[in-house]
Amino acid sequence: MDQSTVPLLSHVTRPVRRPLGLALSGLFVAGLLLAAAPTPAAHADDDTSGISGAPAGVNGADGRSRFSYQLSPGQHLDDQYVLRNTGTTPETMKVFATDAYNTDDGAFGLLETDSVPTDAGSWVSFTGGAKTLEVPLDPGATKVIPFSVDAPADASPGDHAAGIVISVQSAQGAILVDRRVATRLYARVPGALQSSLTISSISASYSSALSPLQGSTTLTYTIRNNGNIALSAHMVAGVNTYFGIAAASPVRQDLAEMLPGSTRTVSLTVPDVGQLGYLNPYVSMAPFVDGDALDPGALTNVDRDTVTLAMPWWLIILLVIALIVYAIIRLRRRRDEKIAAAWLEYTEAEARRHAVVQ
């Protein structure tokens, strides 16, 4: 197996008593393997079938991991895409472009095959203006296919995301298998570019542990890309306490790329937070763009914080016990003092009485 290839999730279906077009439409659900590297090959379990694709020059793959363009409204450009049959059986590959979006879990997704693209996916055409190609390839063969990108005259400023998809369908008994791989395509239209990640709806909760110093604080917040540039971010979450003193070591996590207009809810857990009463959880984001993306210029960090309580119940219980013991001791002392005073008064009275009698 080619070391540059990895398995791709396949879509399967069984024949039903409906028109073939409806049966096939159920195959093209989200489930593409989309990576920031050149599109990997897809192999069946027996390793006899595989497909791959990558950005290319006239002589083959040129090392790009994605298609990244800067296009003015109305501008036309040409590029190439290389297809390869990495398996041991002949394949007929269907090639097309469609629009991209962020899935609920933050992955880079593409529209279903029967959905009509309206953004950058609709800007891509193949030879003769075709929107779809059928390319037969023998085992081990490659083919460079030209395509063009035409930005409409009314294209809005910012990043427009799409993907070029390779699809191969094959029947395996009663099952129809659709294997797909795709390469990302980004077209940036110059103009009023805005890079804007925001954090909203931030909240925090504390989970205690057996040890009063080993609890955890979970921050949950919503991130929205309000700009028109696709952005990722380095995130840092931590917890401070009184006077800004750190209550635990911060945790770090990268935010997967967010396309313009997308929203994502993130939860980060900071471990080993003591029950210190007042806690000030915070999150900081440093936006960035992927290595092969166009430079958007200076990017601004985003910081948010909130307040939560982690009551030191162990200390409170000890204090309550100490107060109870102190109160008991005080009550006993007062009672003993009253008894002693009464006894002293009695003995003095008896002494005076005996003195009078004598």
Image: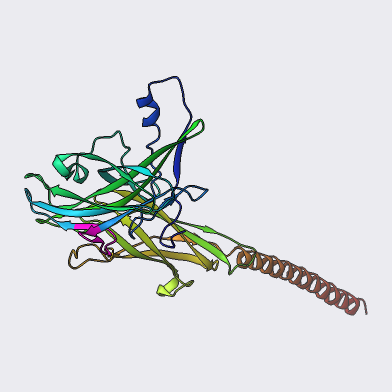
Picture coordinates of residue 112, whole percent (x, y): 33, 38
Residue lying at 16% horizontally and 44% vertically, measured from the top left: 127
Q: Residue at x 55, y 66 (%)?
A: 275
312 left or right of 64 in image: right
Task: Decide if residue 107 is on the left or right side of residue 62.
Answer: right
Answer yes or no: is residue 143 visible: yes
Q: Is residue 240 left or right of residue 286?
A: right
Instruction: Tell me the quarter of the image containing the C terminus.
Output: bottom right
The tally of labels here is: 0
**Is residue 223 in view?**
no
Residue 66 on the magenta segment: yes
Residue 150's place in the image compared with 344, above or below, is above
The location of residue 158, given as percent across then percent down, is: 16, 53
Q: Residue furthest front?
A: 138
In the displayed orientation, state which residue is furthest to the top: 17
Closer to us: 88 or 311: 88
Q: Position of residue 93 (x, y in %)?
A: 33, 43
Span shown in magenta: 56-68
